Amino acid sequence: MLIESRISDRVTLLIDCESQGGVDKNAVGATGHPDRILENAVTIIRAAAEQLGEGLSLDGQPPPVVMEVEFGVRVDANATVALARNPADAHFRVKLRWDG
Protein backbone atom coordinates (compact mmCIF):
# COMPACT_ATOMS: atom_id res chain seq x y z
CA MET A 1 0.00 0.00 0.00
CA LEU A 2 1.32 3.45 -0.86
CA ILE A 3 0.58 6.41 1.38
CA GLU A 4 0.81 9.80 -0.28
CA SER A 5 2.09 12.65 1.87
CA ARG A 6 2.01 16.18 0.44
CA ILE A 7 5.16 17.90 1.68
CA SER A 8 4.32 21.12 -0.16
CA ASP A 9 2.28 22.23 -3.15
CA ARG A 10 4.99 20.89 -5.44
CA VAL A 11 6.40 17.91 -3.54
CA THR A 12 4.68 14.61 -2.72
CA LEU A 13 6.29 11.83 -0.69
CA LEU A 14 5.10 8.26 -1.36
CA ILE A 15 5.72 5.72 1.40
CA ASP A 16 5.29 2.00 0.83
CA CYS A 17 3.57 0.60 3.92
CA GLU A 18 2.24 -2.79 4.89
CA SER A 19 -1.49 -2.86 4.36
CA GLN A 20 -3.68 -4.02 7.22
CA GLY A 21 -7.00 -3.56 5.50
CA GLY A 22 -8.57 -0.31 4.41
CA VAL A 23 -7.61 3.02 5.88
CA ASP A 24 -10.27 5.52 6.89
CA LYS A 25 -8.54 8.86 7.51
CA ASN A 26 -11.54 10.05 9.54
CA ALA A 27 -11.83 6.92 11.69
CA VAL A 28 -11.81 7.25 15.45
CA GLY A 29 -8.42 6.12 16.68
CA ALA A 30 -6.56 7.10 13.52
CA THR A 31 -3.26 8.35 14.88
CA GLY A 32 -1.73 10.17 11.96
CA HIS A 33 -2.49 12.05 8.78
CA PRO A 34 -0.54 11.29 5.61
CA ASP A 35 0.34 14.95 5.05
CA ARG A 36 2.08 15.09 8.45
CA ILE A 37 4.28 11.98 8.06
CA LEU A 38 7.53 13.86 7.42
CA GLU A 39 6.76 16.45 10.12
CA ASN A 40 6.04 13.66 12.62
CA ALA A 41 9.20 11.79 11.61
CA VAL A 42 11.33 14.91 12.12
CA THR A 43 9.71 15.47 15.54
CA ILE A 44 10.62 11.92 16.62
CA ILE A 45 14.17 12.19 15.23
CA ARG A 46 14.76 15.57 16.91
CA ALA A 47 13.44 14.35 20.28
CA ALA A 48 15.56 11.19 20.09
CA ALA A 49 18.69 13.20 19.16
CA GLU A 50 18.16 15.66 22.00
CA GLN A 51 17.54 12.89 24.53
CA LEU A 52 20.57 10.90 23.37
CA GLY A 53 22.79 13.99 23.29
CA GLU A 54 21.82 14.95 26.83
CA GLY A 55 22.26 11.39 28.06
CA LEU A 56 25.71 11.05 26.51
CA SER A 57 27.05 14.42 27.65
CA LEU A 58 29.18 14.83 30.73
CA ASP A 59 28.33 17.87 32.89
CA GLY A 60 26.83 19.62 29.85
CA GLN A 61 29.92 19.01 27.72
CA PRO A 62 29.89 16.78 24.64
CA PRO A 63 31.30 13.28 25.13
CA PRO A 64 35.11 13.09 24.83
CA VAL A 65 34.99 10.35 22.19
CA VAL A 66 33.31 9.80 18.85
CA MET A 67 29.95 8.03 19.20
CA GLU A 68 27.33 7.00 16.65
CA VAL A 69 23.76 5.89 17.14
CA GLU A 70 21.62 4.51 14.33
CA PHE A 71 17.89 3.87 14.40
CA GLY A 72 14.99 3.63 12.01
CA VAL A 73 11.65 5.38 11.73
CA ARG A 74 8.70 3.46 10.33
CA VAL A 75 5.28 4.51 9.03
CA ASP A 76 2.27 2.20 9.19
CA ALA A 77 -0.83 2.08 7.01
CA ASN A 78 -2.62 4.55 9.33
CA ALA A 79 0.18 7.13 8.84
CA THR A 80 1.43 6.52 12.39
CA VAL A 81 5.14 7.37 12.69
CA ALA A 82 7.20 5.36 15.21
CA LEU A 83 10.69 4.07 15.86
CA ALA A 84 11.27 0.83 13.97
CA ARG A 85 12.11 -2.40 15.75
CA ASN A 86 14.72 -3.13 13.12
CA PRO A 87 16.51 -0.33 11.22
CA ALA A 88 16.52 -2.53 8.11
CA ASP A 89 12.69 -2.41 8.07
CA ALA A 90 12.51 1.37 8.47
CA HIS A 91 11.24 3.89 5.96
CA PHE A 92 13.77 6.44 7.25
CA ARG A 93 17.19 5.42 8.59
CA VAL A 94 18.84 7.94 10.89
CA LYS A 95 22.46 8.03 12.00
CA LEU A 96 23.51 10.49 14.70
CA ARG A 97 27.19 11.18 15.40
CA TRP A 98 28.89 13.06 18.20
CA ASP A 99 32.53 14.05 17.81
CA GLY A 100 34.32 14.76 21.05
Image (spheres, helix red, strand yellow):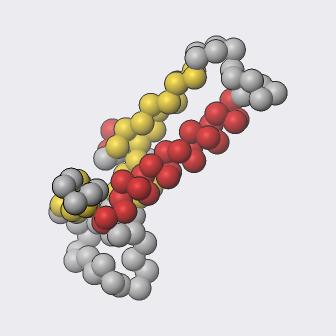
Give the x, y percent position of residue 68.
Answer: 52, 24
Please tell me which residue is depicted at 50% across the width and 30% down the height of the picture. Answer: 96
Using the rendered view, name the quadrant where residue 22 is placed: bottom left
Split into 4 quadrants, where in the image is the C terminus? top right
Using the rendered view, name the quadrant where residue 82 is placed: bottom left
Split into 4 quadrants, where in the image is the N terminus? bottom left
Tag count in the figure?
A: 0
In the rendered image, is residue 57 in sight?
yes
Give the x, y percent position of residue 36.
Answer: 37, 62
Residue 80 lies, with reference to residue 41, above or below; the image says below
Question: For the view shown, which residue lies furthest in the right direction?
Answer: 59
Q: Nearer the viewer, residue 11 or 96?
A: 11
Residue 9 lies, with reference to residue 41, above or below; the image says below
Residue 43 lies, with reference to residue 21, above or below; the image says above
Give the x, y percent position of residue 16.
Answer: 21, 55
Please tell me which residue is depicted at 50% across the width and 51% down the height of the picture. Answer: 44
Question: For the view shown, which residue lies furthest in the front direction?
Answer: 9
Would you say 100 lies left or right of 81 here?
right
Please tell me which residue is depicted at 31% across the width and 47% down the height of the picture. Answer: 91
Would you say 85 lies left or right of 1 here?
right
In the rendered image, is residue 17 in sight?
no
Please tell me which residue is depicted at 40% across the width and 47% down the height of the picture. Answer: 73
Q: Nearer the viewer, residue 93 or 18?
A: 93
Give the x, y percent position of residue 74.
Answer: 37, 52
